[in-house]
Amino acid sequence: MAKSDGSSYFRRTSLFWIVTVTLSMGYYTWAVFRPQQIPYDTLGPLGDLTQYLVKEYHGIMYKGWWISWAVHLCEALLALKVCSDKGIDSPSTRLLWFVQTVLFGFASLGLLLKYKAGGRAKRH
């Protein structure tokens, strides 16, 4: 629970985004670094698409993998700036926002951006 002054505001991203991003990035990593181990035939259309992309565009997929992590890192650095701007000054809370945003990207950063300093985050 956040302190009333907001200096320790942290919200975990939803389970939906945790599972979606973890499975997506895990599969992407598998396709880029161990494509020979993917059971393409058992994955239906996803297997066909992955096999085509690996065969025709592996170099682009490799670069895209690094770019996706670079984007997550940039989002995490932005999260640190947003923490400062919103008065979230607890080092442990800032670390939580940084790590969560590196792992889950905008699914995490969006929660931080919704936070109203001096008030509560918008709820939907």
Image: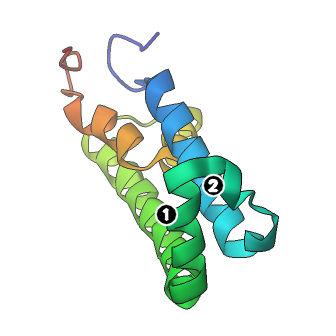
Residue at mark 2 = 27
Give the residue displayed 66% in from the left and 73% down from the top. 32
x and y percent of residue 109 in the render? 35, 43
Res 11 → quadrant: top left
Q: Is residue 83 left or right of residue 61?
A: left
x and y percent of residue 85 in the render? 25, 46
Residue placed most toward the observer, 94 or 110 = 110
Q: Is residue 99 visible?
A: no
Label 1 Cα neighbours within 10 Å, binned few <14 / some 14-19 / many ≥20 = some
Residue 94 vertical position relative to residue 31 in the rendered view, above or below: above
Q: Is residue 25 left or right of residue 73?
A: right
Q: Which mark is residue 7?
A: none
Q: Quadrant of the C terminus?
A: top left
Residue 1 vertical position relative to residue 79 in the rendered view, above or below: above
Residue placed most toward the observer, 38 or 44 = 44
Amino acid under disc 1: Leu
Q: Is residue 44 visible?
A: yes
Amino acid under disc 2: Tyr
Q: Secondary structure at mark 1?
A: helix
Give the residue displayed 39% in from the left and 26% down from the top. 7
Label 2 Cα neighbours within 10 Å, binned few <14 / some 14-19 / many ≥20 = some
Residue at mark 1 = 73
Q: Are marks 2 and 1 in contact (CB under 8 Å)?
A: no
Q: Secondary structure at mark 2?
A: helix
x and y percent of residue 19 in the render? 55, 33
Residue placed most toward the observer, 97 or 29 = 29
Closer to the N terminus: mark 2 or mark 1?
2
Q: Is residue 42 left or right of residue 60?
A: right
Judged by depth in the image, the label closer to the viewer, 2 or 1, is: 2
